[in-house]
Image: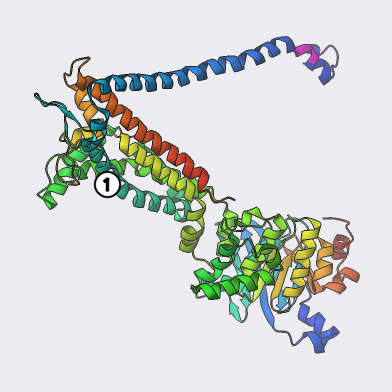
Amino acid sequence: MAMNEPKQLSVQELIAQKSNRGLLAFTEKLIPKILLLIATVSVLTTIGIVFTLIFETITFFTEVNVLSFLTGTEWYPFANSTPTYGILPLIVGTLKITAIATFVAVPIGIATAIYLSEYASDRVRRIVKPVLEVLAGVPTIVYGFFALTFVTPILRSVFPEISIFNAISPGIVVGIMVIPMIASLSEDAMTSVPNAMRDGAYALGATKFEVAVKIVLPAALSGIVASIVLAISRAIGETMIVAVAAGSTPGFDWDVTGSIQTMTAYIVQVTTGDAGYGTTIYYSIYAVGFTLFLFTLFMNMLAQFISKRFREEY
Amino acid sequence: MTTTIKPASDVLEKKEPAVKSNKASVYKTNQLNLWYGSNHALKNIDLDIKENEVTAIIGPSGCGKSTFIKTLNRMIETIPSVKTSGEIIYRDRNIFSKKYQVEELRTKVGMVFQKPNPFPKSIYENIAYGPRIHGIKNKKTLDEIVEKSLRGAAIWDEVKDRLNENAYGLSGGQQQRICIARCLAIEPDVILMDEPTSALDPISTLKVEELVQNLKKEYSIIIVTHNMQQAARISDKTAFFLNGEVVEYDETNKIFSNPTDDRTEDYISGRFG
């Protein structure tokens, strides 16, 4: 040890010895440029995708009237004589699934979040949270088969009028799929409500439930609503479950017991089928995809708007 | 261990029996002990706290004064590892008894915290929250309660035109008085204050101190404070806590002019803590 230290240097001298200021300044200048380049790649990719969607959609609209696309109530692209492209049945199909999923997921998801953040002991939370995350990691094709081979038969044994392909079963299963999303994000929002606020309410003689519902829930509302909107957005875009279990019969009605088709399922149907490149059907998936994109974009912007606008400031 | 503790009633009866002894007790603690896990935080506390007085609790950081005041409305139970022994008698009932519902106790015993903690709601909703959860729904009654409470907390004139604005838009001192008003809204019997001015500027502190002086006509107030001048200014009795024990409990005048225990003298003269 001692022979390594011929003489005692002050810390400042050691710093001067080791200092590499020149190189450091160079890398400091370079690093932001490299990072910018990487960021640009992801932004350009997004822009590229959107532009592809837009261009192919425009091509589609040179062959099909925009108005009849947006307001048409019949979607028969595969009809041999006169194919019709009215997107409303696909939108209605998507909305059926989304509505059923929301109806299932919101109460269960929020109840779970309240339980986890306000009632559960640390031990329970340590077990339940990872289980929820596993649920969120199940591949959607598995959910699809779960809907088709498990939920649908149960529903049919209770309500025999339900057909094999229907809206209700995949709707419920899409709901189950997004429960972890609502539960987990809402729980985060509720857990981040400061304890001082709970104490303020407890000190007034509030019960646990009163604190949870009247203090924590409103204080975390923006996060909770944002989680719901994101879950809805996810349900709108969900593909495999509806492609497997919902059927492929676009219809313009509110019946949930029969076969339907969603926007996503139509795209799957065309891309896995044998529609040739350059045909109207080929371009139609871009138009449907673009519509879907607008829906989810709107929902995501709504989520951001809500989380900013309705935040209870603290 | 408790040899230095003089029950206040003894001391008082000797000094001014005619005036003070007829005040009823709000709280009597009886060999109160408290542990955080294995850490013995309160040791054999025997205190007799009288009604319509301001009782100050002073002592260095970590002496158990905040723990003590949070035990009085059982807020301490939000910490899972806490164990207690002994009794706290509030108005003739042991608050640790199984039959005593904690919500009932806290409806009688309000609390103001160290940092202002209004709810992220409007000023009106902050005050109305307490009465609402206890079943008062009538809008007119609530309006009256809100005005009365805000007046009681000496903040009505500052906020009467902005009752629907978020309480977090107010200054720290105003927020603290909103919290006091929120506490007054359910007309408790006792108000516990845990260093209520430690996060406030001197002017806001003064306002809160004046408020405490006014409130003691109708309420019994127990206040924890780091600030000895504050204790001297506003309290009738003072308890000096050290390492989880009550070293001395007496008339505030006596504690600050002629303390019995050397440790009290050392503390108030600034030799430690």
Q: Decide if residue A131 is in sight here.
A: no
For residue A301, side relative to residue B258 (left or right): left
- The region drawn magenta spans A16-20
Percent position of residue B180, x then y: 66, 66
Pick the front one: B61 or B184: B184
Q: Secondary structure at mark 1?
A: helix
User: Residue at image x 88%, y 57%?
Assistant: B270
* Image quadrant in which the N terminus of chain A is located: top right
Question: Can residue A17 be found in the magenta stretch?
Answer: yes
Q: Which residue is mark 1?
A: A100
Q: Chain of mark 1?
A: A
User: Residue at image x 28%, y 19%?
Assistant: A59
Pick the front one: B120 or B163: B163
Percent position of residue B114, x then y: 69, 58
Give residue B65's quadrant in the image. Answer: bottom right
Dot 1 crowding, Cα within 10 Å, few <14, some 14–19, many 20+:
many
**Tag 1: amino acid:** Ile
What sort of colour scheme is used for the picture?
rainbow
User: Residue at image x 53%, y 48%?
Assistant: A311
Question: Can residue B52 be found in the magenta stretch?
Answer: no
Vertical placement of A279 versus A261: above or below?
Answer: above
Vertical placement of A195 versus A179: above or below?
Answer: below
